[in-house]
Amino acid sequence: MAPIPGPRPLPVIGNLLDINISQAIASMCALSATYGPIYRLHLGGLDMVLLGSQELVDEVFSRKDFIKQPIGSLITLRALTPDGLLTAFHEQEEWGIAHRVLVSAFGPLAVQKMVPEMLDITSQLALKWARFGDTTAINLTSDFTRLTLDTISLCSMDLRFNSFYKDDLDPFVAAFMDLLETSDARDLRPGWLNYFTWTENRRFSKNMKYLHKVAGDVMARRRANPTTKQDLLNTMLNGVDPVTGKHLSDSTIRDNMITFLIAGHETTSAMLSFLFYLLLKNPGPYQTLQAEIDQVLGREPLTAEHLTRLPYAKACLKEALRLQPPIPIFGIQPVSSDPKLPVIVGKKWKLKHAQPVLIMNDLLHRDPLVYGDDANEFRPERMLDENFKKLPKNCWKPFGNGTRACIGSDFALQEAILAVAVLFQKFDFKLVDPNYKLTIKENVTVKPSNLFIYAKLRPGVDATVLSRGLFSNPAEEADRTESKADKSEKSKEQQRPISIFYGSNMGTCKGLADSLALKSRRQGFASSVAPLDDAVGRITGEHAVVIITASYEGEPPDNAVKFVNWLSEPRDADAFKGARFAVFGCGNRDWHDTFQRIPTLVGSLLQKHGATAIAPTGDADASEGNILGDFEAWQVDNFWPGIAQIYNYDTQNGVSRTEEPWTSGAWAGERLELSAPSLAPGGQATVTEMLVLTASGERPKRHMELKLPEGTTYDVGDYLEVYPQNTRQDVDRLLGILKTRGLEDHGSGGDEDSFRFSLTSRLELNQPATAKTLAKSCQDEMERTRLEWLANSSAEANLASHATTYRRPSIPQILELFPSISVPATQLVSMLPPLRPRQYSISSSPLWSAESCTITWSLITHPPIHPDIAKNPSPTVGLASSFLAGLKAGDTVDISIRAGQARFRPPADVDAAATPVIMAAAGSGIAPFRGFVQHRAEMVRRGHALAPAVLLVGCRSPEDAPYAAELAEWQAAGAVDVRYAYSRVEAETPQGGRYYVQDRVREDGGELAALWDRGARVYICGGRPVSQGIKDVVRGIYLAEAEKRGCGAPTEQQVEEWLVEARRERYAVEVF
């Protein structure tokens, strides 16, 4: 064992003379340069060990024999908040109860709902700066203190300090600032000396009593005037610990009110102050940030949706937290099973049981072995998601670690991103002193000192009308939607049961469970929502089960522990036979070792013991900021189609219909309610150009250019949702059938125009249907026999097995083929699913045009119905593709923009010079890649240097190649290298047979592997045969390269593990 180095302590005062008290953190970092990544200090009567390298920090954070404990000045602050989350001891029961109760108040969904309050306070700051003009020096840290104090108090307690309407900061701020400074000073002095600082002690006691009084008054007011607002204060007053069943005591509520008011604003104001300093000293990132904000917001008022589309802003904040963490030190201690035995660190240093250990964030965050030679430089690109994920574990800890990490981190980052977006949208900034050098003011946190800036309104922004551009009110629309959904719930006896269970500490999974329950009730299911522990013993075949859960450091949430333990018990292989389930997992890939561990475990154990999965397990990554979008996509792509299959429904986009139709005219009226002229939330786009890309052959390709509605924006890689309409011929045919049979009572007050409009624009007429519902309504015995045969499971299975050859008939087709069916219009409405939007990859870049976009699609022809059902059947065309093909320049179409997958976007502009791109597509799968390449071509035209890009295109022949001339032009400009695979040109086939895009991937495998070695991102778009074929080829390339490089032949499992890792980071697939 080696001794832990460090400066020699002096009697009584220890190492006090080795520390500059006014710059203690800087002094400790300087000592590390002398003594290394681990050294010892004696301060304030404590023998402390300091750690400053990622290697050592990773070791202690990966072990279970280290726990977080308040150390130093936090011990002094325990006099103020003994039960606060920040100052409570690890073993305190009050800490555990408070943590479990409070954590839900700061989950992603709860935080997202706070955007209006955050925007309220940020607008006050923006208006103040606007009215100051560009010649008034702004004390940046002071104003950010006002911003963050007012934000946390309003969002968490509905308390307004109104700091922007006062000359001086609130007395609350003065009191706690004095407390922080006193605590910091006491920490560095020998303990016995603090007894003799009488004046300081009296002031400390006075400030403490004042803060307690403020918190007590706020509690008393809320109890006297209760509200239903789900904020932090109501959570503390009314919340129940899910483990012990206890409520928080008044003293614990008081302590945590003060904790959140202090910690919740002090660190965020420091983060923003440091960020502005770093941006003003680094013009490149400043300009990149402002360009991103301009592209995403334009001149629109900021909304919650915008916040997920500002990755560079988030990266800037994370990089500022790396270089200047507001909490530069936090404490842990080793706990040995035998207090007499030491704990060994780094295989050679002994630590005593309960030895105070300080984690030096300033050193950890600048470790050159992690961050390279430019570790001291402000480079936000390293914090973009794809780069951040590549960093080693435990190298970035501004919010602490493990269960004692800051539960308000999502709140802080959202608040900061929102402030940065609003302020950089409206202002340009510069330092009052261009030669300003950063000086630090230290207490429990650190902040810049004497940092002053000028804020100048940007061109086109006027102080007199600024407030009009700061606000929008999305909440009203959400309320209207939810109210309408509630109205359309169906009677309980007509609903099928779905049990939804959530495992959630942060409240996110509970929010998703509630949203799924609301949607499922709207679609005719009796859904229930309960904590996952309530599912113990309830996994049966009586109802479908949905489990939405998270992982916390690889462990289940507090309300899921019993269920996971129960599920893990030994049992028979068919214990859950007949049960049907679906799992959706929430997590954060920053904790990549345990990402999705619990959702994966739950799904695998259920299947191991006989349960059947309704859908593949879904997952959402909180670090990407799109949990709601991921959850919605999983429902549309996997969950609702799975539900349709097990209940024998026709389901589109989460809309299902039962075997027994609803015959209520009132229900039909609700179903046909006309809410607005335009069905799409994005409005109406105008067609400006139509092109036929391939006129002959299967699935001819078309191209359309559209002028977007004013204010609509998109990013390269986004989708255009199109709301198609049924043809007049199809509507007339169905109305004719109903009139012929005297069934035209359409349940809409006798209004045929409304009924016709709904059949045209609201209901799917030509979706394949099951025959079970209609068989009972068939009056002719022979027809009923034929229809019952069609409804028979074996016949259905036969049709399904020939799905590429024959198609099940639609309801109008069945009505035509079986004339004796008598179905009133009210019943018909209940059987037809609502018309869903169709999603198309946008095939253009906003760099080409921010006001217009293009889409590329194939004209779909469905197989005919089976000849056993109809003689000489004719094929039918796809509703949306034929609707689009029938449009002409000047026509309008209902559309909306849907954000694309985060992984299926080209490298960010800042990474485009260093990251090669490999794209492979067949048919209309070229659509997103046209957008990718057009984006690159525009960047080249603007003088950007780009890494190589290869586009492999599968098509029938050179004449069939879409966008050939355009791609050739972009290739000549250096934006892309296009390579074709022609499946119908024998001369181009190297080894005979057909030549597909996966064959071209195999042929160019060595070159593509070299690009992969350079960090290339791979994108695949096409049908399942394309994606699977390329995946098989990539396996072969990996094996060949491994052997070529002398690595030996990897096992099948190793290849699969590599593929899984590749798809997680650099290999994105879009299947249609």
Image: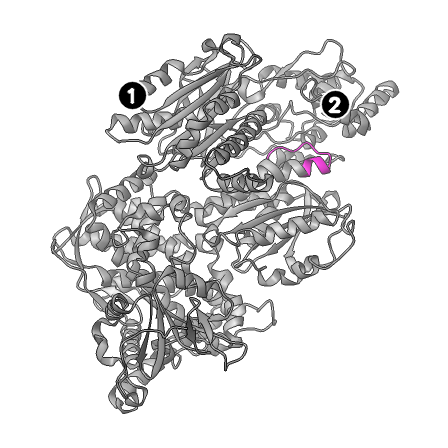
The quadrant of the image that shows the C terminus is top right
Provide the secondary structure element on which disc 1 rests.
Answer: loop
Residue 509 in the image, given as x and y percentages of width and height = 56, 53
**Residue 973: mark in rendering:** 1
Residue denoted by label 2? 799
Relative to 281, residue 749 above or below: above
Amino acid at circle 1:
Ala
On residue 389, the disc is none
Neighbours of disc 2 within 10 Å: few (<14), some (14-19), many (20+): some
What span is in magenta?
Answer: 643-653
Q: Nearer the viewer, residue 475 or 92?
A: 92
* Residue 295, quarter of picture: top left
Q: Nearer the viewer, residue 570 or 602?
A: 570
Please determine whether, in this image, residue 462 is positioned above or below residue 44. above
Answer whether residue 565 is magenta in the image.
no
Q: Report if residue 261 is visible in the image.
A: yes
- Judge from the rendering whether residue 510 lies leftward or rightward of residue 432; answer left or right: right
Element type at mark 2: helix
Quarter of the figure that contains the N terminus: bottom left
> In the rendered view, does 206 fall on the left or right side of 738?
left
Q: Position of residue 828 (x, y in %)?
A: 70, 28
The residue under label 2 is which amino acid type?
Answer: Leu
Q: Quadrant of residue 759?
A: top right
| Residue found 63% across the figure and 42% down from its top | 522
User: In the image, what residue occupies the spot 38% across and 79% down?
Assistant: 75
Q: Which mark is first along the chain, 1 or 2?
A: 2
* Residue 925 in view, yes or no: no
Q: Please provide percent x and percent y for residue 862.
A: 63, 18
Give whichever of 319, 693 is nearer the camera.
Answer: 319
Query: What secondary structure is the magenta-colored segment mainly?
Result: loop
